[in-house]
Amino acid sequence: MQYIKGNFVDTDGIEHQELFFLLDDEKRIDFYQAAQISKKQFLVLCSDTNGLIRVASVSPSIYRKLPDNQSVQGHYFNSLRQENGMPMSTFDLVYRLPKSVTDAEIIKIAKLHLAGNEGSEIGHTIK
């Protein structure tokens, strides 16, 4: 068995906990190809422990055995690719979000972190 290591990607960033995902034999070619092209972190689809499909940012390294005190947190499905076939990075993902979506996410984050924020528009100026 082989494993890959990465972190789940959420709307507000990358989770801090590093996880290991099982890399099945039939999925290795896709991973190898993306790892050879990227040579740095790239985005993939993986399952989590609840069986949900999630986006993860993974390193291009493959592990032949799990480190001590680690367990498999899901399965690798496939790499996420751009239109030109290049593996997708977190920057590529955010860059391709529609402006209205990124604005809405910024507003949500601002409401969580700024006390008493009643703003509902990005770029709103006070006159």
Image (cartoon, helix red, strand yellow):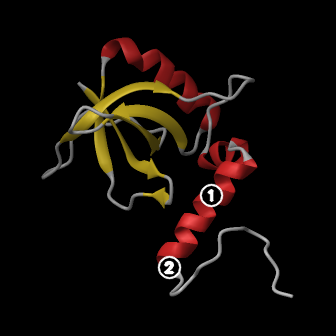
Residue for point 21% across, 37% down: 50
Density class for disc 1 (Cα within 10 Å; few <14, some 14-19, many ≥20) is some
Count residues near mark 2 (Cα–Cα under 10 Å), then give few for <14, some for 14-19, many for 20+: few
Q: Residue at x 54, y 32 (%)?
A: 35
Name the N-terminal-most of marks 1 and 2: 1
Residue 104 badge:
1
Q: Quadrant of the C terminus?
A: bottom right
Q: Is residue 47 above or below residue 102?
A: above
Picture residue at 40% right of the left edge, 17% below the top = 27
Q: Position of residue 45 (x, y in %)?
A: 44, 31
Q: Nearer the viewer, mark 1 or mark 2?
A: 1
The answer to whether 65 appears left or right of 6 in the picture is: left
- Decide: is 105 above or below 81: below
Identify which residue is drawn at 71% across, 51% down: 100
What amino acid type is highlighted by mark number 1? Ala
Q: CA distance from mark 1 to mark 2?
A: 14 Å
Which quadrant of the rendered structure holds the N terminus? Answer: top left
The residue beneath circle 2 is 113
Secondary structure at badge 2 equals helix
CB atoms at circles 1 and 2 under 8 Å apart?
no
- In this rendered view, identify the residue nearer to me: 70 or 107: 107
Q: Amino acid at mark 2?
A: His
